[in-house]
Image (cartoon, rainbow, N blue to C red):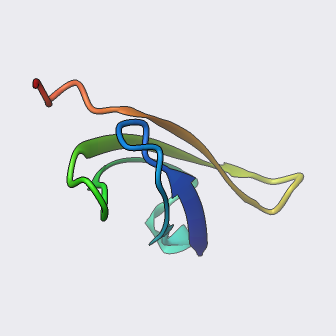
Amino acid sequence: MQQKIRCPFCLEKFSLEIYPEDGDNQDLTYDCEICCHPIDIGAHWNEDLQKFTLDIRRSTGFSE
């Protein structure tokens, strides 16, 4: 399922794929396609909306 997100580091938008077959609640770390910083993503299936809701935040594994 294609999702558009905004990077919490560079604020640019890009798309990523969330796979429903991987479960209703998923925790992912994804590198921004623009600035390459790691992003923590919590994907949770919303039954009412029939789509994933996303919690997007800076990964704690990154230090500048």
Q: In which quarter of the image is the C terminus?
A: top left
Using the image as rendered, state which of residue 29 and residue 37 is in the foreground: 37
- Report the label total: 0
Q: Where is residue 54 in the image (x, y as percent from the top left)?
A: 59, 45
Using the image as rendered, state which of residue 12 and residue 25 is in the foreground: 12
Q: Residue at x 11, y 24 (%)?
A: 63
Q: Position of residue 45 (x, y in %)?
A: 67, 52
Q: Residue at x 89, y 52 (%)?
A: 48
Please identify the residue farthest to the left as the structure is shown.
Answer: 64
Query: Vertical placement of 52 versus 9: above or below?
Result: below
Q: Specify whether 28 is left or right of 50.
A: left
Query: Vertical placement of 11 versus 21: above or below?
Result: above
Q: Specify whether 41 is left or right of 3.
A: left
Which picture quadrant has residue 20?
Answer: bottom right
Q: Residue at x 43, y 46 (%)?
A: 7
Q: Where is residue 26 in the image (x, y as percent from the top left)?
A: 45, 49
Q: Where is residue 53 in the image (x, y as percent from the top left)?
A: 67, 47
Q: In which quarter of the image is the N terminus?
A: bottom right
Q: Specify whether 7 is left or right of 36.
A: right
Q: Which residue is drawn at 22% across and 45% down?
A: 37
